[in-house]
Amino acid sequence: MTDPSDPTDRRYTKSHEWVKSEGSQLRVGITHHAQSELTDIVFVDLPKPGKAVGAGESVLVLESVKTVADVYAPTKGTVVAVNEALKKTPELINRDPYGEGWLYLFTPEGPVDEKAFLTADGYRAFVASAAPH
């Protein structure tokens, strides 16, 4: 298991995805918080490369021993690659959500507004404010 602190080299969504810019593409995964809430992930329904999605649309589904959860597109664009290793080893998402457990590579349509996403500190504050007291 990696350090659960949210890396500062990427941005976060309120639906618990992380987005990391890699040139003109975005690498997308789910946060440590999301994978811990899902518990043991047992199946990933990966999209086919070339799939076009709108901002906020479901891109793929994660199945855990506890529930099924959608993963959403951070912005409008096209899936260009998926993490094939997750087909055989979906638990990589639990073990290393910010590294080997990435989900898909995405080419956004048009410029990405970084301000539309949360910073690591902003995401941690969002999770803390949403937690039951």
Image (cartoon, grey):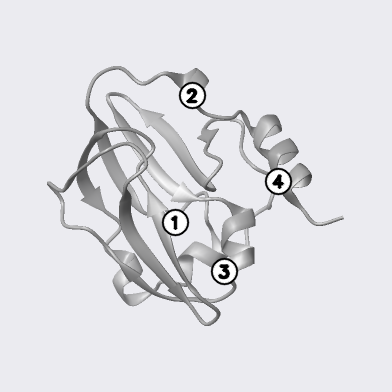
In front: label 2 or label 1: 2
Q: Amino acid at mark 3?
A: Leu
Question: What's the CA distance linking mark 3 and mark 4?
Answer: 15 Å
Q: Which mark is residue 38?
A: 3
Q: Amino acid at mark 4?
A: Val
Give me the residue at 41% from left, 18% from top: 113
Callout 3 crowding tier (Cα within 10 Å): few <14, some 14–19, many ≥20 = some
The mark nearer the N terminus, 3 or 4, is 3
Quadrant containing the N terminus is bottom right
Looking at the image, residue 61 sits to the left or right of residue 2; the answer is left
The mark nearer the N terminus, 1 or 3, is 3
Give me the residue at 26% from left, 38% from top: 54
In front: label 1 or label 3: 3
Looking at the image, residue 31 sits to the left or right of residue 130; the answer is left
Looking at the image, residue 86 sits to the left or right of residue 96; the answer is left
Q: Amino acid at mark 2?
A: Ala
Circle 4 is placed at which residue position? 127
The mark nearer the N terminus, 4 or 1, is 1
Looking at the image, is 30 positioned above or below residue 39?
A: above
Quadrant containing the C terminus is bottom right
Give me the residue at 73% from left, 48% from top: 130
Callout 2 crowding tier (Cα within 10 Å): few <14, some 14–19, many ≥20 = few
Give me the residue at 27% from left, 39% from top: 106
Picture coordinates of residue 79, whole percent (x, y): 22, 44
Picture coordinates of residue 32, whole percent (x, y): 61, 54
Question: What's the CA distance linking mark 4 and mark 1?
Answer: 23 Å
Circle 2 is placed at which residue position? 116
Q: Amino acid at mark 1?
A: Glu
At mark 1, the secondary structure is loop
Question: What's the CA distance linking mark 1 and mark 3?
Answer: 18 Å
